[in-house]
Amino acid sequence: MMDKTYSIAIDGPAGAGKSTIARTLAKELSFCYVDTGAIYRTVAYFMDLLGISPKDVDGVNRYIDELTIGIEYDEDGVQHMIMNGMDVTSDIRTPEISQKASQVSAHRVVREVLLDMQRELARQHNVVMDGRDIGTVVLPRADVKIFLTAEPEIRAQRRTQELKDKGEKADYSQILRQIRQRDEQDTHRAIAPLKMAKDSIAVDTTHMSPEEAAAEVRRIVRERTGI
Ligand code: DC
């Protein structure tokens, strides 16, 4: 039995392999996997249903209090997002919501509301948390911080394949364009931009299989924490 609460932060741009690696790691360690992107996606989806543009700061400010976000885990450890009592886990996984989540996440009010929620989860559980600002802002004292990267072309290839595997239409050039656009937005916003924490360890997954990348991260976690 562990006598402290561990937190492992995994940050990086879209398609670097964060969620696959974080989920694998959490399963191996019996930690809770917190996908913070899904929380931003839920905000974007909510605003979208109300017809509020994700760029409309006044609109977002006005309606954010109407949103109650729940996070639940099923028996397989899969994170479900509950928006005002409704399970929206699969609704938030569209390319359109990816873009809108990136835009809505730039607003201060959104980041503040979500910050408390993320910290509370880490207070209560051992977590592997992935996102853009986990090591820098949300959990600056995380036990291990990993910054995952990969070339944009590889990340776009992975996203294209993921969508095709789900039987959805996917256009590589369009996905590459969207990835570059999100990188630009997420890296250049004023509050909590995507950047590597000083004490983070960079792992470039460009030439790694998902298994190799997960093994490398597992090795780093073992080396740093002994668990
Ligand atoms: O990880 P993802 O692709 O599901 O994230 C969707 C968007 O949410 C991402 O483009 C930026 C935002 N996000 C954020 O600003 N901070 C986080 N910790 C996680 C996601």
Image (tube, grey):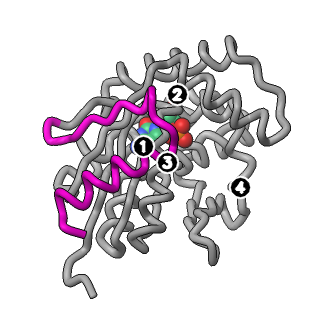
Residue at screen point 37% across, 36% down: 148
Locate residue 211, reporting x and y percent.
Answer: 49, 48
* Element marked by disc 4: loop
Amino acid, disc 1 = Ala
Amino acid, disc 3 = Glu
**Label 2, label 3: how far apart the Cα atoms are:** 32 Å
CB under 8 Å between discs 4 and 3: no
Amino acid, disc 4 = Val
Q: Name the residue under label 2.
A: 103
Locate residue 42, reporting x and y percent.
Answer: 61, 48
Tell me: is circle 3 under 8 Å from ligand 1.
Answer: no
Q: Mark 1 points at which residue?
A: 213
Locate residue 184, reporting x and y percent.
Answer: 44, 17
* Mark in the foreground, 4 or 1: 1
Tell me: is circle 1 under 8 Å from ligand 1.
Answer: no
Boundaries of the magenta span: 198-227
Q: Can residue 136 be seen in this view?
A: yes
**Label 4, label 3: how far apart the Cα atoms are:** 29 Å
